């Protein structure tokens, strides 16, 4: 089974939260593609200022579980450890330290959180090249299963996007698949590659594009399975629906 460096996975996961949440709030504010194209830096900055007091709790609600995917080796261990932690009345900080697995990894999480939140308060999103150059490095020998890392990042990105939609439109928010695909292409590129790809296929379907980024059919299927599971949960449990991309 292939492995990936844990600090690299954590950095991709945290960026995926902020980009996903921001994209969700933008989609909820912009009922048409034309309006979305007019979003400026000041609009992104205002979105973050509006959420300044609540963004950490939204991050915790999603990332506590997904960070623990990177820490615990299997679903049963994860379930037991999370259940035990939640019963002990611990603070957010203490719970996140458990999810991160060590003080060093918790510090990495804090640095990445501050980095991306600061960027967004300036009205900007970090690009792929910046992220791969600047993300906080940890123990080079600490690794996690690639499949669990993909699952964690995909779940974080899609749940954060949905939470962003719901923050602006709590009664009825529509998922735009094109936005989610764009988020996942960026997030998986950061997770699975060491540098921006020199070129992506100019022709072919979306599956071909994702295969180039995911590297292997196994990684691609893991991504699709997790994305569809999160969609199913949102539709069944939260009444979400898909936006008609033709409108």
Image (cartoon, rainbow, N blue to C red):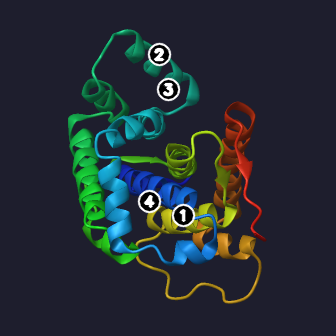
Secondary structure beneath label 2? helix
The image shows residue 21 at horizontal and vertical percentages of 46, 52
- Cα–Cα span, label 4 and label 2: 29 Å
Tell me the residue at 36%/77% (across/down): 129
Instruction: Kindly check if marks 4 and 2 are in contact, taking CB atoms under 8 A apart as contact.
Output: no
Q: Secondary structure at mark 3?
A: helix
Label located before the other in sequence (3 or 4): 4
Mark pair 2, 1: CA separation: 31 Å
Say which label, 4 or 2, has the lower sequence index.
Answer: 4
Tell me the residue that label 2 is attached to: 83
Q: Report if the CB atoms under discs 1 and 4 are less than 8 Å apart.
A: yes
Q: Which residue is mark 3?
A: 78
Residue 141 appears in the rendering: no
Image coords of residue 164 (percent x, y): 50, 49
For residue 183, the mark is 1
Sequence order check, earlier mark of 1 and 4:
4
């Amino acid at each position: 089974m292939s492995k990936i460096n844990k600090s690299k996975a954590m950095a991709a996961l945290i960026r995926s939260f902020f980009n996903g949440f921001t994209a969700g709030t933008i989609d909820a504010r912009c009922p048409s593609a034309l309006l979305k194209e007019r979003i400026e830096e000041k609009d992104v900055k205002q979105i973050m200022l509006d959420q300044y007091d609540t963004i950490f709790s939204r991050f915790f609600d999603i990332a506590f579980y997904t960070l623990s995917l990177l820490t615990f080796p299997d679903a049963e261990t994860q379930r037991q450890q999370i259940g035990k932690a939640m019963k002990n009345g611990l603070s957010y900080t203490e719970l996140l330290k458990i999810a991160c697995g060590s003080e060093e990894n918790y510090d990495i999480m804090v640095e990445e959180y501050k980095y991306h939140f600061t960027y967004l308060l300036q009205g900007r999103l970090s690009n792929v090249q910046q992220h791969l150059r600047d993300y906080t490095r940890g123990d080079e020998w600490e690794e996690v299963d690639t499949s669990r890392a993909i699952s964690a990042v995909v779940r974080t990105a899609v749940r954060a996007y949905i939470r962003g939609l719901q923050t602006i439109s709590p009664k009825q928010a529509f998922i735009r698949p094109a936005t989610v695909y764009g988020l996942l292409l960026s997030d998986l590129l950061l997770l699975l590659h060491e540098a921006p790809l020199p070129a992506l296929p100019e022709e072919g379907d979306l599956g071909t594009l994702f295969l180039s980024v995911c590297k292997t059919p196994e990684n691609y299927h893991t991504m699709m399975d997790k994305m569809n599971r999160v969609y199913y949960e949102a539709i069944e449990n939260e009444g979400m629906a898909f936006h008609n991309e033709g409108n």
